[in-house]
Amino acid sequence: YIKRKNNGKGSIYVSEISVQPLAQKEEAKSDNAIENGDFSMGMKEWSYEGKKAPGKLLNDYPDLGKTAYCMHNDGEGFNSLYHMGIPLKSGTSYELSLSMKCDGVPEDDISVLLLCFGPDKSGKESPMAWIQVPAGSGVVNLIATGGSYGWKKLSAKIPAVSIPSTAK
């Protein structure tokens, strides 16, 4: 979940979004829990709040070798982009990472969060809670950024204790 606070001032570009188990990352395996984290399949698996998209896909980033999504709707509101159904397993530590570029974005305007899903009382898959790091701290912003900078990799480690025991 990539959320903006200041109604879309400036432009952010994102690509190569991944959530990988730390054990597999250390073994150099690629088991990204985020399908289409590089936007190579367009907006498949991605959505946004409101009726208007918060930006557009751009295919002209040869330095990434992939497509990027640009969020830029200044003053439009609802500047959030999210991916549904990221499978997280309890008892597993993860690393969230993404490539990002910012241009004229207010400081700490961008928050990257993970919403954990699991079965509700009827067994239906439902939102459970925002992942908090440290666990139980109330801190749900896994990555906060803003400003102006070229492409860089941002990441956050998510310890196993932060994943609810009923996560699926």
Image (tube, rainbow, N blue to C red):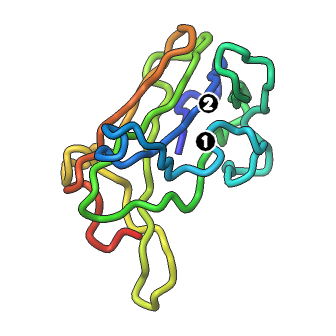
> From what the image shows, is residue 96 above or below residue 9?
below
Q: What element carries label 2?
A: strand
Residue 74 appears left or right of 23:
right
Residue 55 appears left or right of 83:
right
> From what the image shows, is residue 158 above or below residue 101?
below
Q: Quadrant of residue 70?
A: top right
Would you call the spot at circle 1 few (<14 residues within 10 Å), some (14-19), or many (20 or more)?
Answer: many
Q: Residue 87 carries which label?
A: none
Is 15 in front, or is 3? 15
Query: Amino acid type of disc 2?
Result: Ser
Q: Considering only order in the chain, which callout, 1 or 2, is on the residue closer to the N terminus? A: 2
Residue with the mark numbered 2: 15
Residue 124 appears left or right of 37:
left
* Distance from the alpha carbon under mark 2 to that under mark 1: 7 Å
Is 65 in front, or is 168? 65
Query: Amino acid type of disc 1?
Result: Gly
Determine contact: label 2, label 1, CB under 8 Å: yes
Residue with the mark numbered 1: 37
Q: In which quarter of the image is residue 142?
A: top left
